[in-house]
Amino acid sequence: MESTIWFTDGFVVITGEIGAGKTTVIESFLRELGPNTLVAQINQTQLSASGFLQTVLSQFGYKPFKMRKAELLATVNSFLIEQYAAGRKVVLIIDEAQNLSSKVLEEVRMLSGVETTKDKTLRIILAGQPELNDKLNGPEHIQLVQRVRLRFHLTALSPEECLDYIRHRVKVAGAGDRELFTPEALSFVYRYTGGIPRLINTVCDTALLAAFALDKDVVDGTAMRSALDELQWVERAAQTGCLPALKLVEATPDPAAILGRVYLSKDGHTVSERALGLGRLMIGRIAENDLQIDSHFVSRHHCQIMVTPEQTVIEDLNSTNGMMFDGQPTKRHVLCDGDEIKIGRHTLTYVNERPKETLPHADDGSAEFRPNDTQSFDRHASSL
């Protein structure tokens, strides 16, 4: 976002899942701007083209609600050129931009073209959920996409980052170095939040309240279970249809343990293999990735694989050509044994090497849980 202050020729696009922290990042950015920077921040994006222009002008102190479209455009253009002449920089930030209509996105593109003989006069940041990329990549927005200078996808926290985040929030709140959450309680957090900061905030805050109600000095497993019951949450892994880890993680897993493998193939021939331990595996065209795919169909940083004790997830990183599973485009997929992900002309095959989990059968307690056994899954998820 800071690059929008340095350059004037293009958009910056920031995407992230709901609750990943996009608005927090924007607020932090705004606090760092100097007095010579004027900002219009739009959060309500279900607007008509005229309503959008009126909202922009009202952010700059105008009362434009009786202006016609032509007058709105003329006023915006004059304002931008006046600010440029006065040495001030103007930034337009649009949050929840995935809700913008095609007509409004066209107005945004036109505004980005307001210029003097030397420079553009408006800097634009679009922030939104992952669907924003799908909208921008549509054929009707080719001209707009060509003006995008930078894109960044705000991913969820890793298990280690999740733990650091909780400790930081507790410390800032005044607990110092006290460990208010037991390892048993912490083992639940990532499983039920998937590393989304907003969900981490919610479950930890509810757990602290539950511990207080139970007259406990720390949040233990009992208090965390009470909070989860109150929220009526299920594990985020359960929402994908793959096998969730229903057993409590009571000890820190061996970070060197091999939990799976991926095989990269092209035209039916395996060209590379990687073992998967806990952590992140970056995949892309350039050499700095953990798994390099030398193909012009693959982006510099195309996707990543996140491995936790409970699941293995592959996420697209706003790549140009995306990735496919079972013939359909996908942004995020929880990998099951044997899954094949198409990346350009290459195929990534996942092999699970976790120990097989067994869950009690409704009748005799001996049957192995199968991911497709939805009735069994529902019974165990609800009992948890």
Image (cartoon, rainbow, N blue to C red):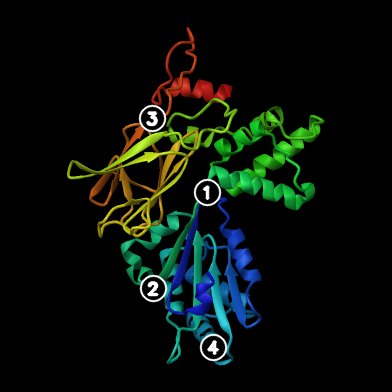
Q: Nearer the viewer, residue 39 or 278?
A: 278
Q: Give the Cα distance between marks 3 and 1.
A: 24 Å
Q: Give the Cα distance between marks 2 and 1.
A: 27 Å
Residues tagged 2 and 1 counted as in contact (Cβ below 8 A): no
| Disc nearer the start of the sequence (2/1) | 2
Q: Which residue is mark 1?
A: 156
| Disc nearer the start of the sequence (2/4) | 4
Q: Residues within 10 Å of mark 2 (few under 14, many from 20)?
A: some
Amino acid carrying label 4: it is: Tyr
Residues tagged 4 and 1 counted as in contact (Cβ below 8 A): no
| Disc nearer the start of the sequence (4/3) | 4
Q: Secondary structure at mark 1?
A: loop
Please give the name of the residue rendered at 58% of the width and 55% of the height, measured from the top-left corner. 21
| Disc nearer the start of the sequence (2/3) | 2
Q: Secondary structure at mark 3?
A: loop
Amino acid carrying label 2: it is: Arg
Q: Which residue is mark 2?
A: 147
Q: Give the Cα distance between marks 2 and 3.
A: 44 Å
Q: Nearer the viewer, residue 105 or 354?
A: 354
Q: Position of residue 293 (x, y in %)?
A: 28, 53
Depth check, mark 4 against mark 1: the one in front is 1
> In this picture, is 187 found above or below 108?
above
Q: Secondary structure at mark 4?
A: helix
Seen in the image, is 350 located left or right of residue 80? left
Give the quarter of the image for residue 270: top left
Q: Which mark is residue 353?
A: 3
| Disc nearer the start of the sequence (4/1) | 4
> In this picture, is 366 found above or below 74?
above
Q: Position of residue 378 (x, y in %)?
A: 49, 24
Q: Which mark is residue 84?
A: 4
